[in-house]
Image (cartoon, rainbow, N blue to C red):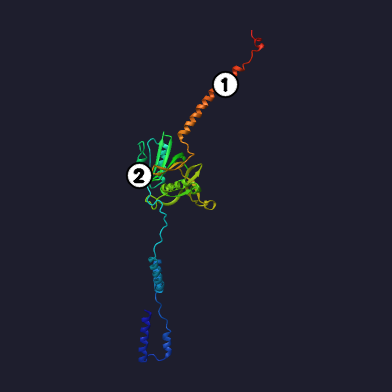
Amino acid sequence: MKNKKKLDEKRKQAELKARGEIASASEDSSSDEEVEPEEPARPAKKQPSASKKRKAAAESDEEGGDGEEDEEDEDEDANRDKPRPKVEFTGVNTKEKCVILSSRGVTSRYRHLMLDIGTLIPHSKKDSKLDTKNPKDAVVEVADMKSCTGAMFFECRKRTDCYMWLSKCPQGPSVKFHVENVHTMAELKLTGNHLKFSRPALHFDAAFDDNEQPHLKLIKEMLTHTFATPYRHHKMKPFLDHIFAFYWEDGRIWFRNYQIVHPQGKEVRSSGVTLSEAGPRLCLHPIKIFAGAFGGPTLYDDPTYVSPNVQRREEKKNDQGKYARKVQKKAERKAHSRMNELKPDELDDVFQD
């Protein structure tokens, strides 16, 4: 609007000059120095929003950085052509499945132990109890029906003794353990509490890698195939919050399950990562290792193992000897008292009337 007004004024002045109405240049200067009328105040412009500022900055970058974009596109094309890095996978437990079952006559303690182990192993499958006299061959058939590559069979005898079999089906090998010192999760009531079916870390004692005891290497491999979670199992939770520990002491394998506790708040500075036991607890005494599934040639036999039946028989013999010793001592006491009787005293009848 200002420019239009100035143009109109200049046109009028030029017409007046042409007609001779304006005499001198002083008047022209005075006419130029005339104060223009003030325009009304305009409303303040709104500031652009953050999104508009971003768009404007992006447009400016696009205008000024075409060369950089071309370089980035070339880098992206080069990265696409490169093969993706492969995840290192050892091949252990690729498609492992383990069936867990027991024989008839199992007690409540061992039944709860089976349930606890089933909650720790996501690739486990359950089956009903076997009531046949020789159920070992039937376990291989059950594992084949369930499409399982391994089996964990609890064989209970006389409602007191429990034997655990770990076997690879159908060709073997297999290990027979005597289960001792069993404590279930419900019985212990420990403070550890990890996620169900989360991925565990396996810890083995250094004795399992001893070359002087090659049978421990085979047992370690069997335990790894049984307790390690398969690669990308559909029930597995992608968290590492507990650890399975296997220790070799006194000719036995001691099993413990610990939760990995990360400190929070002020405890971070004072203490680091700690372990809290979650249970269950059990002790496995290896008896024999067979080349086949639940049988076959014997690869290892523990010479120090004593059957629970022999232990009970020895205890009964000791109890019988205890009673015989008690009777003998009683007879010796009577004979000693007869041989050492006191002689009658002359003054015994003095105070008797």
Residue placed furthest toward the left? 145
Above or below residue 342? Residue 302 is below
Above or below residue 282? Residue 328 is above
Mark 1 or mark 2, whichever is nearer to me: 1
**Mark 1 neighbour class, 10 Å CA radius: few under 14, some 14 to 19, many 20 or more:** few
Q: Residue at x 47, y 31 (%)?
A: 313
The image quadrant where one finds the N terminus is bottom left
Above or below residue 325? Residue 194 is below
Mark 1: amino acid: Glu
Q: How many marks?
A: 2
Between 218 and 160, the one lying in front of the other is 218
Disc number for residue 143: 2
As helix, strand or loop, the secondary structure at mark 1 comes to helix
Between 245 and 7, the one lying in front of the other is 245
Determine if residue 46 is in view. Answer: no
Above or below residue 50? Residue 209 is above
The image quadrant where one finds the C terminus is top right
State the CA–CA distance, disc 1 to disc 2: 65 Å
**First along the sequence among labels 1 and 2:** 2
Disc number for residue 256: none
